[in-house]
Amino acid sequence: MRTESNSKRWNEIKTNDSWAIFKIMGEFVNGYEKLSKIGPCVSIFGSARTKPDHKYYKLAEEVAAKIVDQGYGVITGGGPGIMEAGNKGAHIAGGTSVGLNIELPFEQHDNPYIDSDKSLDFDYFFVRKVMFVKYSQGFVVMPGGFGTLDELFEAITLIQTHKIESFPIILVGKEFWGGLMEWVKTTLLDAGNISAKDLDLIHLVDSGDEVIEILNEFYKEYDLSPNF
C-alpha cells in the first residue's frame, strides 16, 4: 500500500524529472552553439586507460596529426589515454582540438591539449553522443572498452537505419579489432541479423596513412556535413 510519505517522495521524483529537462536542454543549446563554429572535424575514440608509452597512444597521436594536416580538426572525449593522444596530436600539429568532457569515476579528467575555447562539459552521455555524431565528418576508433564499443555501434546503427547521413567509420588496429570483425562476419551475417552491405560501413586499418586515404576517398564523392 502506498503511504502518504511514499506518495510525497514519488511526487518529488516526478518534479525533479520534469526540471531535469531544462538542464538537458541547456547542454544541447551550449553544445550546438559552440560546436557549430568549429569547422569540419574527425572524432577519435579509444580507451581512457591507455598509457603514453603504449603503441596505440603513439599511433592515435600520429593519426590525429595526419588528420589535422588534411584540414580537419579533432574531437575526442576530452579525457586521458587515447583521448589525450588525439588532442595532443592535433594540438602539436596546430589544428583544432576539441574535448567533450564527462565526469566518470576513477578515469575521466580533462587533458591539457584541448583548445581553451573548445572544451565542453556534459553530465549526460546521450547529449554528448549527439554532439559526436552531429559534428564529426568521420569516426576513428582506436582500441578501447565498453564506452568505445557503445559509441562505435551507435554510429553504425544510426547510419544503417538512415537516421543520419553516412560518414567513414574506421577501426584502427587489426590485431585488436580483427576478432570482433570476424565475429560480425561469421555470426551476425551468417545468422541473417545484418546484411552484407552493412559490412561496407566499417573499415579496418593499421596506419594513419590508411585513415587519411579512406577519409579523402569518401569526401571525393560526398560533401562535408551541412553544418559547414
Image (cartoon, rainbow, N blue to C red):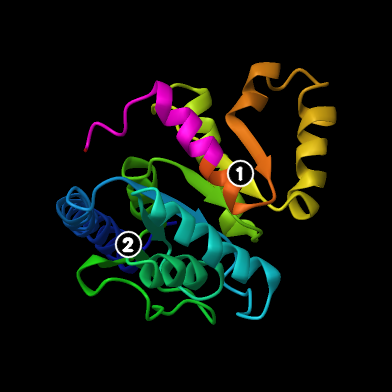
Other residues around mark 1 within 10 Å, as few (<14) / some (14–19) / many (≥20): some
Q: Are marks 1 and 2 in contact (CB under 8 Å)?
A: no
**Magenta segment: does it hold 69?**
no
**Residue at 47%, 29% in the rendered image:** 218
**Mark earlier in primary sequence (1, 2):** 2
Give residue 100's position: percent from left, percent from top.
Answer: 35, 63
Callout count? 2
Other residues around mark 2 within 10 Å, as few (<14) / some (14–19) / many (≥20): many
The image shows residue 118, relative to residue 193, as above or below, that is: below
Give residue 177's position: percent from left, percent from top.
Answer: 74, 49
- Looking at the picture, tell me which residue is in the foreground, 219 or 198: 219
Give residue 46's position: percent from left, percent from top.
Answer: 58, 61
Give residue 75's position: percent from left, percent from top.
Answer: 38, 57
Circle 1 SS class = helix
**Residue at 24%, 31% in the rendered image:** 226
**Amino acid under label 2?**
Gly
The image shows residue 145, relative to residue 129, as above or below, that is: below
Circle 2 SS class = loop
**Magenta segment: does it hold 224?**
yes
**Amino acid under label 1?**
Glu
**Residue at 35%, 65% in the rendered image:** 99
Q: Which region of the structure is painted magenta?
A: 213-227
> Marks 1 and 2, how far apart in space?
20 Å
Majority secondary structure of the magenta segment?
Answer: helix
**Residue at 39%, 43% in the rendered image:** 133
The image shows residue 198, relative to residue 96, as above or below, that is: above
Instruction: Give the labeled residue for mark 1.
Output: 210
Left or right of residue 58: residue 16? left
Q: Which mark is residue 95?
A: 2
